[in-house]
Image: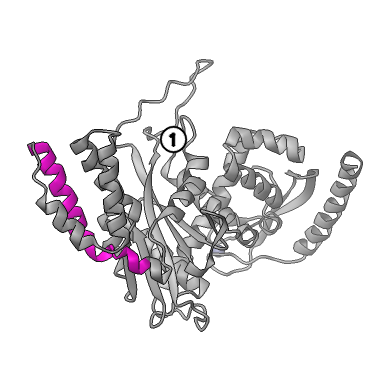
Amino acid sequence: MEIEFRPRMLEALQAKVNVLADVVRTQIPVCAQCGQPMKRHDSETIHWLARFGRLNAAVERYRCRGCKQKCRPLLDLLGVEPGRISGSLARLLTLLAVVAPYTLAARLAWLLLGVKISPMGVWNATQRLGEAAVRHSAALSQYHWDSRSTGVPTQDAPPVVVLSVDGCMLGMQVRKQRRRRQGGEPLPPLPPVEAGQFQEVKTGVLLLPGERVETSPGRRSLVRRFLVSCLGNADDIFRHLYAQLRELGWLDTARTLVVVVGDGAEWIWNRATIFVNRCEILDFWHALEHAWEFAQACYGEGSQQADRWVHRIAEDLRAGKVEEVIARLKRIRPKTPELREKLEGLIRYYSTNSTRMHYDEYLRLGYGIGSGAVESAHKQVVHARFRQAGMRWSESGARRLLALRLLLLNDNWALLDRLAMVSVA
Ligand SMILES: [Zn+2]
């Protein structure tokens, strides 16, 4: 059926384009820079690829006498790339690239859509739409950050919102310039990746505590959650989180309590202060991890004694007895300087965070005590697409693909239809 109807779909699409082209031809565009009417410069027949095959149209080009600006209104209106792909095909290819590497996405395009395209063609569409998504999310943050913005009504804002944040590393490209092939030679190998060539992707998850459900014993899942991610900057992620909360109408500054769950990382607590009405929680599993480290050094790796020791700490912490745990740690007399150092580190970690370790209370109030949601989010947002074997990212490339992946994972892909493609150099 598809083979039979493909040509007819193409015909119908071509007819629509023709109608639109006739309408556009009757309108004289104005210059984007000076606002003066532009002058018809020339006309050229342009072909481009849509999902059902090649389309064509006589495309007029206009020019502004004063500013020398040029434009092709029909192509702008249709979202056709100069690379000759229709706007809707570009969105489908981008969708494939958001879930699979570019080479695989190109192959899927052939198998799923019957469209022959190079990995570079997929990459190109992804960059243009990714840049549009990046700019949209930046504009949204800017809007909500501005205290003069009205924002979304908050009368239905929940009493409690849980926000967890975490970071993970992404391998970045070392080269400053693209490698170039000289003649028929193979490309020179990529330089080795050095320690400094990683950047942190920070991810945050927003959820309502009441929407955590237990699908089967011990297996919890979420009805709804919103993901926010960005490359590098700690201020940025909190700005984005704040904007997303406001965009959802979830933040009534006077009423809503923001529960912030994080590991011990300083950048999280320093920035959490933007939420005046907040409750800070140190991720329970991170708290235990530190205890494990000491226990294994003290009693030997995998020993029963270490096991028992940590188990008791876990029980006491869960019961909210953090002060008792600290007092007990202080009574230990370690045998070696290394052990003493480790123990002091653990005591310091618990003392600094003790106000964030009232786990009995958090459990009673239903806030949860772990950052499991953000760790699984990391895997979905970052690992599944960005951390496959040998992958190295340019900063702009990673930023764009992240913005797109968030649209998909937040079930907001349709937004892309409302954004115009951005040309990227
Ligand atoms: Zn002009």
Q: Residue 259 at what x, y percent from top left?
A: 38, 68
Asked if residue 409 shows in the view, the reply is yes
The residue under the point 44% across, 32% down is 178
Front one among 84 and 241: 241
Task: Identify the element where label 1 is drawn.
Answer: loop
Front residue of 247 and 161: 161
- On the rendered structure, is 183 left or right of 7? left
- Say whether mark 1 is within 8 Å of ligand 1: no
Residue kind at label 1, given as amino acid type: Arg
Q: Is residue 86 left or right of residue 70?
A: right
Residue 351 drawn at (x, y percent) = 18, 59
Write the start and end of the magenta stretch as one range: 337-362
Name the chief secondary structure element in magenta.
helix
Q: Circle 1 is placed at which residue position?
A: 392
Task: Report the number of numbered marks.
Answer: 1
The x, y position of residue 413, in whole percent, is: 62, 57
Q: Residue reaching furthest top?
A: 185
Q: Is residue 271 above or below residue 132?
A: below
**Disc 1 crowd, CA 10 A, few/some/many (<14, 14-19, 20+):** many
Q: Is residue 19 left or right of residue 351?
A: right
Ligand 1: image quarter: bottom right
Q: Residue at x 39, y 37 (%)?
A: 171
293 versus 59 height, above or below: above
Q: Residue at x 73, y 35 (%)?
A: 110
Describe residue 323's horizontal placement relative to residue 94 as left or right: left
Q: Is residue 287 visible?
A: no
* Location of residue 355 (image quadrant): bottom left
Task: Say above or below: 408 vs 182.
Answer: below
Q: Is residue 352 magenta?
A: yes
Q: Write the residue at 70% across / 47% down.
A: 89
